[in-house]
Amino acid sequence: MTGASKPMGPIPPGFAAIDGELAIGGVRARDWVARAGGAPLFVYDAALIAARIAAWRAAMPQALALHYAVKANPFAPLLAFMAHDVDGFDVASGGELAAVQAAGVAGGRIGFAGPGKRDADLAAAICAGVTLNLESAHEADRALAAGDRLGIAPRLAIRINPDFELAGAGMRMGGGARPFGVDAELVPALARRLVASGAQWCGFHVYAGSQSLDGEAIVASQAATLALVVQLAETAGVTVPACNLGGGFGIPYFHGQRALDLAQVGDRLGDLLDRRAPALAQTRFVLELGRWLVGEAGVYLAEVIERKQSRGQTFLVVDGGLHHQLAASGNFGAVIRRNYPCAIATRFDAPADDVAHVVGCLCTPLDRLGDALALPHAQPGDLVALFCAGAYGASASPAAFLGHGPAREMLVSSGSAIVA
């Protein structure tokens, strides 16, 4: 091995080798690529997702319902699979709403948040019986007007912009001036108006941030959320039929990060709910999770097209890139680019005897999937595996950039696959 390597994140649990190659769902990566018709390919292991959901249910208090945040991964077979295992879905656009409905999910199991909902989005949600998490007083006016036109009392909740953040979150969506939600001090008056309007009052939604690995910070945020909801409900003089506590559960992408202590969070949340104020005695509580449920169950596979030497450094040029895995390239909000967990899938159990940069096929220096990685020696035809690819991959990346086209996707289970 020559040259200094840079650290990468930990390969998630649940992956092993068959005949020296990475196995996903009990089948070699190369065989999945052959079944799909080629690389690049996202493979999502349904068994790992099911195990994740089971672990959540075992650790969390029974008072909590589990919703899947569709923005993490809207792949149609994945939505159909999740429909049987989670209690509900949270969408952030009319397109996501349509995708969840196509998976056979009834409107009563869907919440719709997100700024800038169009009139057509509001109407579709109201007709389907979806709970609209209102982001502003103006959106409330538009939803009520749409309900009047349709002759349907809309299901309405208020998304609160709290006066606190989720400490250590990778993405902060609450506290300060935000495009998300109604500032907390404005909530009581709006809640009274919604109840008086005759709409179906559904309660509150608070989402302070995402991608946190700090259990103490998550529980502190949830405690602050419960206190705020009680205060606002009592000030407004309204009940709280349901309260979406947000999510925030992160996964370890980078060197030095450790998995969230789920048991710690579950125990502390259970204690908080056991001691909740009388105003919340009949409240239904929801956690919405996306990345934590599906992120570590996905692998992105790309084929090495060329092994290139340039001024003493090695580049493995693959047939994929940032147009499929924008986040792994460091161009999805990262301040400093760090390496996702990566492996040579076709030499998965071989020792690392090489240092190479993994780069994509796009004509831009931004297309780097791995910097100075310690890997087994790879040649054209080998497969590179990028892990933690189950969330914010295919749908969060600019697939049309430079015309290379989208990656294939597969949901796999017990040796079988659904390809789209």
Image (tube, rainbow, N blue to C red):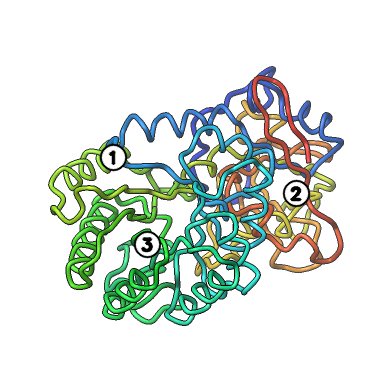
Separation (CA) of disc 3 from disc 2: 56 Å
Q: Amino acid at mark 1?
A: Ala
Q: Pinpoint residue 286: horizontal percent, then vertical percent.
A: 37, 48
Query: Is residue 4 among the parts visible in the rendering?
Result: no
Dot 3: element: strand
Q: Earlier in the sequence, mark 2 or mark 1?
A: 1
**Residue density around tag 1, few if under 14, some if 14–19, many if 20 or more, within 10 Å:** few
Question: Is there a contact, CB below 8 Å, between mark 2 and mark 1?
Answer: no
Residue assigned mark 3: 201
Point 53% across, 63% down: residue: 152
Point 45% across, 70% down: residue: 134
Q: Nearer the viewer, residue 10 or 315?
A: 10
Separation (CA) of disc 2 from disc 1: 50 Å
Residue assigned mark 2: 316
Q: Pinpoint residue 317: horizontal percent, then vertical percent.
A: 78, 51
- Residue 303 sits above or below residue 30 on the image: below
Dot 1: element: loop
Separation (CA) of disc 1 from disc 3: 20 Å
Quick one: quadrant of the N terminus? top right
In screen coordinates, is 33 left or right of 200? Answer: right
Point 54% across, 72% down: residue: 148
Q: Pinpoint residue 292: horizontal percent, then vertical percent.
A: 46, 45
Q: Amino acid at mark 3?
A: Trp
Q: Quadrant of residue 178?
A: bottom left
Quick one: quadrant of the C terminus? top right
Residue assigned mark 1: 63
**Residue density around tag 3, few if under 14, some if 14–19, many if 20 or more, within 10 Å:** many
Q: Earlier in the sequence, mark 3 or mark 2?
A: 3
Of marks 3 and 2, the one in the foreground: 3
Q: Pinpoint residue 5: horizontal percent, then vertical percent.
A: 56, 50
In screen coordinates, is 179 left or right of 243? Answer: right
